[in-house]
Image (tube, helix red, strand yellow):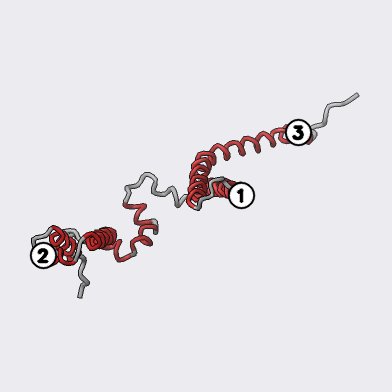
Amino acid sequence: MKSAPLLHEGRAPHREPSAGRAGAFFLFPQRVGARMLHELSRALPPTIFFFVGFNFIVLTTNLLVAEYAAAVSTFMLATLAALVVGKAVITANAIPVITRFDRAPLIQPILFKSEFIQLFGPAEMRRLLFASRPSELQLNKRQRARELLRLSRLTDEHAVDQFRDPGSAAHQQLVAIVERLARAPQPKP
């Protein structure tokens, strides 16, 4: 026959530790499973995006080098890279610095991040963002390259005598290209 536990001056009766711990023991796998499912659902969209993108790159590379059969090892490497990059995107989005400018005006993240500064250089960024623009915009590097390409094609298509004749179309095109190139930025003294 069991007797009721004695209470000692306001203390709660002693309970067996196995009853509370058993419930927590059975809830632990459910919590781990729910957490893994949550992480997997967050990582799935970027992983699928990079999986498709990386495998298109692998396919294009194989076609360019005339290997018309897809290599399993490169497919597996692209898939593994997609998994790693997908998780890296989730990890990077968890960093508060990355999400700092989500709702800010576009100029704030541009000034904060260094990609544009590395792309254009610090002097060019200052000029683009803070200098006044001239009325006649000067050619950038891409436009200069296009003009030089036009000049190369023009010289391939016409003989030297056609350029010497001021009334010919080849001469007029040559003069127009040279004038556009002459408007290139002049070094400041």
Name the residue nearer the viewer: 145 or 25.
Answer: 145
Q: Residues within 10 Å of mark 3 (few under 14, many from 20)?
A: few
What kind of residue is marked 3? Ala
Q: Name the residue that disc number 3 marks.
A: 22
Q: Name the residue that disc number 1 marks.
A: 73
| Rendered view: 21 above or below 111 | above
Does label 2 or label 1 sit earlier along the sequence? 1
Q: Quadrant of the N terminus?
A: top right
Q: Name the residue that disc number 2 marks.
A: 165
Q: Mark 2: which secondary structure?
A: loop
Mark nearest the camera among 2 and 1 is 2
User: Where residue 28 sits in the image (x, y, percent)?
Assistant: 69, 37
User: Where residue 80 sits in the image (x, y, percent)?
Assistant: 59, 48
Q: Is residue 165 left or right of residue 107?
A: left
Does label 3 or label 2 sit earlier along the sequence? 3
Residue at 26 percent across and 58 percent down: it is 146
Q: Residues within 10 Å of mark 1 (few under 14, many from 20)?
A: few
Residue at 28 percent across and 62 percent down: it is 126
Name the residue nearer the viewer: 115 or 67.
Answer: 67
Residue at 27 percent across and 60 percent down: it is 149
Q: Mark 1: which secondary structure?
A: helix
The answer to whether marks 2 and 1 mark residues whose Cβ atoms lie closer than 8 Å is no
Q: CA distance from mark 3 to mark 2?
A: 99 Å
Q: Is residue 136 left or right of residue 114?
A: left
